Image: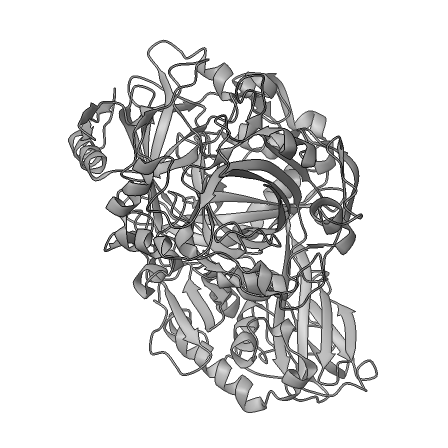
C-alpha cells in the first residue's frame, strides 16, 4: 500500500495495502490438499507461489518473462495461488521476472518478484514486499521496464542483498510481531491469509518505489493530527541505511467480518436496501445494519447519504466486497478511546466494474469493526496529484511551452455548508430522496443553496490552507508558511469548489493566528480578523485579492450575490515540486529528441499555485512522505474565522520525476497518433476537428499493467497579452511587475535578463469575443470531460457540453481594445487522460498545442 512522498513504482507499491502475507519459515511448495495451512499446489510444480497484498489477489494474471524475452502466463486461484508446471516453462531461461496484475476496486495493481534459478519445487511469492526487493535489485525504477539483457545480468547475490536490506529495515516491527528470523518475502512457502504472523506484518507495511530505492512505512505508527510522522524508512539501491521502522503494531482480526456484512447487505435487492426516503433520512434494511455506527459522519455526510449511490443502484445487487485495506492507523486504543484505522473498501458491481471508497473504521468493545467516518462537519480534504504535461507548441516566446512534470496536492473544499451560530457546519446539499443522497442539478448548486441560508447561519466565504513548507529567503518550498487563500472561481455562478487565489500576507497571517488563539477551539459566532494591507484596513479577508503578495488590491464580487467573493483563478491544485521536460519525441511530427519543444524556465511559474523553490529539501520531503497534516481555516461570508480543521493527508505524494517514469514505462493510457493529430495538429490536414464540432471522438491504448484512464478531458482557451523582452519596462500592469521585485528580487532579475521575446504572463488573460465597441461576452475558455470505464479504449461521438474553440474564435477574439501592435493571442488546446494510481494518486497525462495570432 504505498503511501509516501514518492509513489509506489510501477505498481510496486500497489494500493497502500498490507503487503503480501507470507508464512514464517522457509520450505518447499506444499503438494496435495492444503488443509489448514498448506497451499495445495499441483504435484511437482516447476515454479509456484502466492500473490497477495494482505489478502489474496484472486484471479490475478501471472506473467513470467525470462532472460531471453520469452513470456509465459497463468492465473492465480481464489487463494492467490499460482503454478507453472514443469512442462509449461521447460524452455524458460532464468533469471525470471514474475508479474502479478489484477484490478482492485477501481485501480490496476501490479507486483513483481525476481527469480534467479529454476528447480522443481521452486517457490516465488509476488507481493508488494517482493516488489520492494525486485525494485532494489533492478537497474530500472520499475522492474517491468527492464530489457531482457538487464534481466539476464541480475545475479542471485543482487536479490540476496536486496532482501537483506528490506529485512533489516523492517526488523523491529518483525520482531514485535514474532516473525521468525528466517522469514524471506520471496521464498517462504508457509502462508495462511488469516491476519496473523507474517500476514499481519503485511497489514502494517506500505512500500513506495522511487528512482533511488524504496520507501517502507509502518502504517500502524500513530501520530497526532498536528505532528509529523516518522514512520517511514528509505532503503537505497546503492549503499545501506541504518534507519528502521518503529515497532508500533496492532491486529486486524475482524476485517473480513466487516467485508462480509457489506456482502450480506448487497445481496438484498436495491429496491429494498433503502425505504421511507425523505430529504432528511431513510430506513436501512435490517441486513444492512451493523456496518456503520449510528453517529457516523464523514466530511459532513451521514452513512446513508455517503453510500446512497451504491445502496440505490441495481448494478450493485450481489456486489462483491474485499476485506478493507489499511491506509493509516489514526488512533490507538487506551485512555477511554477506541482504535481507529483509515482504510480503503474495494468492491465490484454485478458487471465487474470496480470501485474504491476510503473510510474510517473503529474497533468496538467486542473486537468487531464499524464505519464511523472522520467526524468532520465539512467536506474538505486533500489528495495528491501527479502530472505529465507534453506541450508540442513551438511558439517563438520564452515562456509559452509548458512541458513539465509536477507533483502537488489537490485541495478539495466544498463551500456548500451552513455555519450556524455555534460554529457548527451542516452539509446543505443532503437529500435522501435522490439516488445520490444529495440535491441534484441547480437545486444542489452553491448559488441556489446560498440564496436560502437558514436564519442565524452563514455560508463559507473563503478558506486559508496551510501545509508543510518553509521560507528560503524570499522564496518558499512546499506551502508558503502564511498559507494560501481559496475562493470560488468566477468562471461560473454555480461552482461548488474553491480555487487558489493568492498567498496570504504577513499581516493577515498574524491576525488569523491571533484569532485562533483567542477562540481556544470554540469559534461560536466567529472571530473577527482585521489587518492592514497597502495602507488600508481589511476587515474581510474573503473580499480581498492579494495579487502576487505585493500587487494592487482588487475587491472581487459576484454581482448576482454580493455576499459571495470570488477569484479569477480556476485551479485548486497546489504544486509542490516541478521539473521542466527537455527534448523528447514530438508526438505530432514523429521527430525524436526534438529540442524545439523543451519546457520553459521554472522561474516563470510565479503564481500562488506554485512553490517558488521547486526542489524541496530533504527535511520537507520527509514531511510529505509521512501523511502530513493539512489545515483548513474556514471563514464565512462576513470574513469571520469560524473553524480550524486539521486533516491528515493520507497517501503518498510522489516526486515529480515519477510522472515521467510512469509515462515512459507505459503505466498510463496514451492517445493514438490519429487522435492527437485530430485535435492538436493545426497545420496538418488530419486536424479534422472544426470550430463547430459538437462531439468528441478519441482512441487510446492501455498496457496490461497500466492504470487505465477513468476520464478524458478536452480543454480549450484563447489567451491574450502583450509581448516584449525583459520585464523591467513593461508598459502594462507595472505595479505587479514591480511587486515581483518586492516579493522575490532574485526571480525578477533572473527573468529580466533572459534574452528573446516574452509573452508577458502578469498581464495576460482570457480573451473575449470582439464587440462593436469593446471586448464583450464570456471569456474564451471551454472544457469538456467524459468519464469512462478503465477498460474502455475509445470514445465515439461523445457530446461536447461546452463550446469548441478553433481558429475562427482565435481570429475573432478581442485582444486589444486600444489596438496595441504588441498584443498577441494564442489558442490553446489540451487533450488529457486522468486516472488514479494504486496508491490513490490522481495522475494526469496531457498533450497540448498552441496556435498563434500575430
Tell how many labels. Answer: 0
- Looking at the picture, does residue 619 appear above or below residue 647? below
Left or right placement of residue 549 versus residue 624 in this view: left
> Residue at horizontal 68%, vertical 55%?
669
Please name the residue shown 52% across and 31% down the image. 303
Task: Give the color scheme: rainbow, by chain, secondary structure or one colour.
Answer: one colour
Mark yes or no: residue 332 visible: yes
Q: In the figure, is residue 39 to the left or right of 757?
A: right
Q: Image quadrant of residue 60?
A: bottom right
Where residue 451 sits in the image (x, y, percent)?
45, 12
Which quadrant would residue 417 be assigned to in this image?
top left
Q: Position of residue 630 (x, y in %)?
A: 35, 45
Residue 797 lies, in percent from the top left, at 80, 36
Q: Is residue 367 visible?
A: no
- Quarter of the image holding residue 271? top right
| 376 vs 204, nearest the viewer | 376
The residue lying toward the viewer, choosing from 561 and 257, is 561
Question: Where does residue 435 sit, x and y in percent of width and height?
Answer: 64, 25
Q: Is residue 277 left or right of residue 568?
A: right
Amino acid at each position: 500500500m504505498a503511501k509516501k512522498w514518492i509513489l509506489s513504482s510501477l505498481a510496486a507499491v500497489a494500493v497502500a495495502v498490507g503487503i503480501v502475507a507470507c508464512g514464517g519459515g522457509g520450505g518447499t511448495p506444499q503438494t496435495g490438499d492444503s488443509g489448514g495451512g498448506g497451499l495445495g499446489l499441483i504435484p511437482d510444480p516447476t515454479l509456484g507461489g502466492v500473490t497477495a497484498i494482505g489478502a489474496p489477489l484472486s484471479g490475478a494474471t501471472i506473467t513470467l518473462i525470462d532472460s531471453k524475452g520469452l513470456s509465459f502466463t497463468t492465473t492465480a486461484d481464489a487463494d492467490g495461488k499460482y503454478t507453472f508446471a514443469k512442462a509449461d516453462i521447460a524452455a524458460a531461461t532464468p533469471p525470471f521476472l514474475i508479474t502479478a496484475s489484477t484490478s482492485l476496486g477501481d485501480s490496476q495493481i501490479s507486483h513483481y518478484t525476481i527469480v534467479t534459478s529454476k528447480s522443481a519445487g521452486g517457490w516465488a511469492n509476488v507481493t508488494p514486499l517482493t516488489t520492494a526487493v525486485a525494485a532494489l535489485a533492478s537497474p530500472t525504477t520499475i522492474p517491468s521496464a527492464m530489457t531482457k539483457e538487464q534481466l539476464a545480468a541480475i545475479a542471485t547475490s543482487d536479490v540476496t542483498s536486496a532482501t537483506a536490506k528490506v529485512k533489516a529495515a523492517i526488523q523491529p516491527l518483525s520482531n514485535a510481531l514474532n516473525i521468525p528470523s528466517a522469514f524471506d518475502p520471496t521464498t517462504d512457502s508457509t502462508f495462511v491469509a488469516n491476519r496473523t504472523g507474517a500476514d499481519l506484518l503485511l497489514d502494517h507495511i506500505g512500500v513506495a518505489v522511487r528512482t533511488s530505492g524504496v520507501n517502507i512505512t509502518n502504517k500502524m505508527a500513530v501520530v497526532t493530527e498536528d505532528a509529523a510522522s516518522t514512520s517511514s524508512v528509505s532503503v537505497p539501491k546503492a549503499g545501506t541505511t541504518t534507519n528502521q521502522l518503529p515497532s508500533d503494531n496492532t491486529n486486524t482480526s475482524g476485517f473480513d467480518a466487516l467485508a462480509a456484512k457489506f456482502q450480506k447487505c448487497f445481496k438484498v435487492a436495491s429496491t429494498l436496501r433503502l425505504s421511507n426516503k425523505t430529504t432528511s433520512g431513510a430506513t436501512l434494511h435490517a441486513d444492512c445494519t451493523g456496518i456503520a455506527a449510528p453517529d457516523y459522519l464523514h466530511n459532513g455526510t451521514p452513512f446513508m447519504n455517503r453510500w446512497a449511490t451504491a445502496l440505490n443502484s441495481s448494478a450493485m445487487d450481489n456486489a462483491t466486497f474485499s476485506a478493507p485495506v489499511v491506509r493509516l492507523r489514526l488512533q490507538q486504543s487506551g485512555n477511554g478511546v477506541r482504535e481507529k484505522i483509515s482504510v480503503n473498501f474495494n468492491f465490484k458491481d454485478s458487471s465487474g466494474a470496480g470501485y474504491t471508497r476510503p473510510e474510517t473504521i473503529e474497533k468496538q468493545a467486542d473486537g468487531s469493526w464499524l464505519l464511523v467516518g472522520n467526524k468532520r462537519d465539512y467536506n474538505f480534504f486533500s489528495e495528491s496529484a501527479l502530472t505529465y504535461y507534453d506541450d508540442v507548441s513551438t511558439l517563438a516566446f520564452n515562456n509559452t511551452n509548458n512541458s513539465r512534470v509536477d507533483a502537488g496536492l489537490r485541495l478539495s473544499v466544498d463551500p456548500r455548508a451552513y455555519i450556524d451560530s455555534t460554529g457548527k457546519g451542516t452539509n446543505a446539499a443532503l437529500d435522501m430522496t435522490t439516488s445520490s443522497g444529495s440535491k441534484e442539478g441547480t437545486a444542489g448548486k452553491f448559488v441556489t443553496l446560498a440564496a436560502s441560508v437558514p436564519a442565524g447561519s452563514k455560508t463559507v466565504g473563503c478558506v486559508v490552507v496551510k501545509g508543510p513548507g518553509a521560507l528560503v529567503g524570499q522564496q518558499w518550498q512546499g506551502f508558503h508558511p502564511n498559507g494560501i487563500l481559496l475562493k470560488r472561481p468566477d468562471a461560473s455562478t454555480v461552482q461548488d469548489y474553491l480555487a487558489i487565489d493568492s498567498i496570504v500576507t504577513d499581516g493577515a497571517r498574524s491576525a488569523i493566528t491571533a484569532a485562533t488563539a483567542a477562540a481556544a477551539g470554540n469559534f461560536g459566532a466567529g472571530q473577527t480578523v482585521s489587518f492592514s494591507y497597502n495602507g488600508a484596513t481589511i476587515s474581510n479577508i474573503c473580499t480581498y485579492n492579494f495579487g502576487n503578495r505585493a500587487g494592487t488590491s482588487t475587491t472581487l464580487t459576484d454581482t448576482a450575490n454580493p455576499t459571495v467573493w470570488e477569484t479569477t483563478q480556476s485551479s485548486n491544485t497546489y504544486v509542490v515540486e516541478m521539473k521542466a521536460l527537455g527534448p523528447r519525441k514530438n508526438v505530432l511530427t514523429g521527430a525524436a529528441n526534438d529540442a524545439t519543444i523543451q519546457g520553459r524556465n521554472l522561474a516563470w511559474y510565479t503564481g500562488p499555485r506554485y512553490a517558488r523553490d521547486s526542489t524541496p529539501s530533504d527535511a520537507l520531503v520527509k514531511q510529505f512522505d509521512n501523511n502530513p497534516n493539512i489545515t483548513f481555516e474556514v471563514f464565512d461570508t462576513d470574513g469571520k474565522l469560524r473553524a480550524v480543521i486539521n486533516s491528515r493527508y493520507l497517501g503518498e505524494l510522489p516526486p515529480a520525476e515519477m510522472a515521467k517514469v510512469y509515462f515512459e514505462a507505459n503505466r498510463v493510457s496514451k492517445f493514438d497518433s490519429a487522435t492527437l493529430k485530430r485535435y492538436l495538429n493545426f497545420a496538418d490536414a488530419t486536424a479534422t476537428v472544426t470550430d463547430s464540432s459538437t462531439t468528441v471522438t478519441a482512441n487510446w491504448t492501455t498496457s496490461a499493467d497500466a492504470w487505465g484512464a477513468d476520464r478524458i478531458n478536452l480543454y480549450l482557451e484563447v489567451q491574450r497579452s502583450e509581448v516584449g523582452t525583459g520585464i523591467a519596462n513593461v508598459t502594462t500592469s507595472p505595479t505587479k511587475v514591480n511587486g515581483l521585485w518586492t516579493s522575490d528580487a532574485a526571480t525578477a532579475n533572473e527573468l529580466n535578463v533572459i534574452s528573446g521575446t516574452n509573452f508577458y504572463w502578469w498581464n495576460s488573460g482570457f480573451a473575449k469575443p470582439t464587440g462593436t465597441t469593446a471586448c464583450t461576452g464570456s471569456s474564451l475558455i471551454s472544457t469538456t470531460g467524459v468519464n469512462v470505464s478503465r477498460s474502455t479504449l475509445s470514445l465515439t461521438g461523445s457530446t461536447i457540453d461546452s463550446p469548441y474553440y478553433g481558429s475562427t474564435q482565435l481570429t475573432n477574439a478581442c485582444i486589444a481594445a486600444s489596438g496595441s501592435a504588441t498584443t498577441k493571442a494564442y489558442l490553446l488546446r489540451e487533450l488529457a487522460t486522468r486516472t488514479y494510481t494504486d496508491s490513490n494518486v490522481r495522475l494526469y497525462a496531457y498533450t497540448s498545442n498552441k496556435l498563434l495570432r500575430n
